[in-house]
Amino acid sequence: MDSRRMCPHCRAFITNKDKVCPYCNERVGPRAIDRREPGALIGGLIPHARFNTTTILLVNFGLYVATTIYSMKAGNGNAISNIDPQTLVSFGAKFGPYIAMGQWWRLVTAGFLHGGLLHILMNSWVLWDLGSQVEEIYGASRMWVIYLVSSVGGFYLSALWNPMAPSVGASAGLFGLIGAMIALGISHRGGAGDAIKGMYIRWAIYGLLFSFLPGIDMAAHIGGLVAGFGIGYLAGTPRYEGAPVEAFWKGGSWVCLAITAFSFLKMYLWFTRVAQ
């Protein structure tokens, strides 16, 4: 496990064993309780897994299986590789007219749905690595707030930009995680910060160029990137254990979790009505 962390005062990289920062000579407490250690899954075969990242992946794949089965029953013989838009809308895809009617919860549920096998595999590949990095650096609470707010922000801009086109995918949240890492590089001055900023700006550029392909929701990517940068810059990295700001972000993560659960409840209640 990486033993480095950031000094909460000067933001230089120090070790977990340092009680006094060797750069600014300020006392530093233990790392925030929110920051989880790597979880060893499947007998240690997945040593760098993170709780939030793994949970999001499981929810995404669970919903993908459900939408695939439903699409097959609706007569789509190609459901595994290409789920039909009506199924995705039924399960909570972003769709401007319904959002305008008050179904705001689609801005949340859309981020956990995917339109095909290649779509979910590509997003999961990026989330597995990027989500783990952000969760390790920002902590579990901040990572969850960044991810959800970025996803909602991305689909909100998408609903304004192109309201008639259904849209789904984790990429709005993923761009938010990229934005948060850019914010980290900007706020941490020095060679390490420049390296982080440069790498993730390149990630953002590559992703936005990819967004010009047909069928890719560029608005969701831009909205997620901007929202993730803003939340990441505001949040900063975890401070010492017991700091009031840590309680704030932990509370924020629980609020985001409650909003997510309520959104899926609203989706389920709406789905049971339209499926009859």
Image: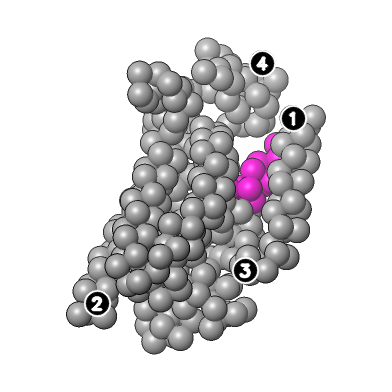
Q: Report the Cα–Cα distance between label 2 and label 3.
A: 27 Å
Going from N to C along the chain, the mark reached first, 1 or 2, is 1
- The crowding category of the residue bearing disc 3, from other C-alpha atoms within 10 Å (few below 14, some 14 to 19, many at least 20), is few
Which residue appears at 54% of the width and 52% of the height? 118
Q: Residue 260 appears in which quarter of the rendering?
A: bottom left
Q: How many marks?
A: 4
Q: Amino acid at mark 4?
A: Pro
Give the residue pinned by disc 3: 215
Hey, what amino acid is under mark 3? Answer: Gly
Left/right of residue 7 with respect to residue 61 in the rendered view: right
Crowd around label 1: few <14 · some 14–19 · many ≥20 (10 Å): few
Residue 85, percent across and down? 45, 73
The stretch in magenta equals 177-189
Q: Earlier in the sequence, mark 2 or mark 3?
A: 3
Q: Say which label, 3 or 1, has the lower sequence index.
A: 1
State the residue position of label 2.
Answer: 275
Q: What is the distance, in whole Å, between disc 4 and disc 2 at their CAs?
A: 63 Å
- Label 4, on which residue? 22
Q: Considering only order in the chain, which callout, 1 or 4, is on the residue closer to the N terminus? A: 4
- Separation (CA) of disc 1 from disc 2: 53 Å
User: Up-down: is 267 above or below 243?
Assistant: below
